[in-house]
Image (cartoon, rainbow, N blue to C red):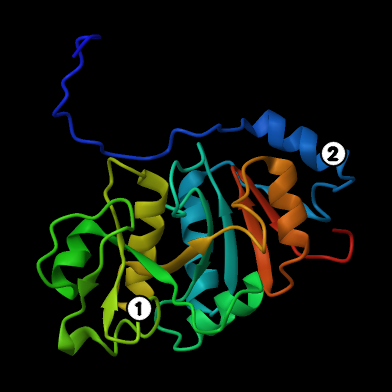
Amino acid sequence: EVYGFNPMDKMQEAYYGPSYSDKEIKETLDRFGLQEGRDYVHVADKSRIATITADLIFQDKVVAWFENGSELGPRALGNRSILLNLCDPQANAKANRIKGRQPWRPSALTITKEEARIHLKDIDEAPFMVVSYEIYEDKQKVIAAGKHIDGSTRPQTVTKESSFLFWEMLNHLKLKTGTAAVVNTSFNKREPIVLSPEEALYTFKYMEDVVCLFFGNFLIIRSPNL
């Protein structure tokens, strides 16, 4: 009120952390001794990134995703995330093994706002992954992972306006799995969620089951050189 802002304004996103340009990411790759064409490729077309990621996830590959500003708060919301196939019943176990955490801990899912209403009871939107919803009985087999033992899930809903590239990737994934959703867990291993390019490379190195890292407009492939 003092500054003239609307005190009833609705928070729409949580991407308030630092972001890094392609130039800054490239400088980090160079400093780490990684070479273009051998260890990574530059993908100029963002839509191509969405397509490649969806293809890999559909093949049950685990992908690290580093995009734009980091998230504020306790959840990975698609900018510092590890992504797995929602249709894979072993996705939760994979995520826990990769991150070195207790086997009983569930992962959450990210789903487009449009798709959420089809799969989850009484949901309109849930952009911050902090509220649980019950999955419809006939969708329990569709959502094989990213849920709790009682059949509920703590989703993040994504819109075209809030996170376009992530939303686009989910819609590419729908063409393959039938559902615009993915298991989404934070990009970290026994440490806080990654923030900088340096932290992302360091953490990716020690996540042996993660096959690649989408890093802005760069795709880093796991190799001995890492």
Residue at position x 19%, y 54% in the image: 125
User: Of residues 121 and 212, which is closer to you in this image?
Assistant: 121
Q: Is residue 211 above or below residue 91?
A: above
User: Residue 211, percent across and down?
Assistant: 68, 69
Task: Please determine whether, in this image, residue 131 is positioned above or below residue 167.
Answer: below
- Rounded to the nearest whole Å, what is the CA distance between mark 2 and mark 1? 39 Å
Query: Which of these two is toward me, 51 or 12?
Result: 12
Point out residue 141 in the picture as x, y percentages from the top left corner: 29, 90
Residue bearing the label numbered 2: 30
Q: Which image quarter is the N terminus in?
A: top left
In the rendered structure, the answer to whether residue 206 lies left or right of residue 179 reads right
The residue at 21%/65% (across/down) is 115
Q: Give the residue type that dot 1 points to.
A: Lys
Which is more toward the observer, 1 or 16?
A: 1
Residue 134 in which image quadrant = bottom left
State whether residue 220 is above or below residue 42.
below
Image mark for residue 206: none
Q: Amino acid at mark 2?
A: Asp
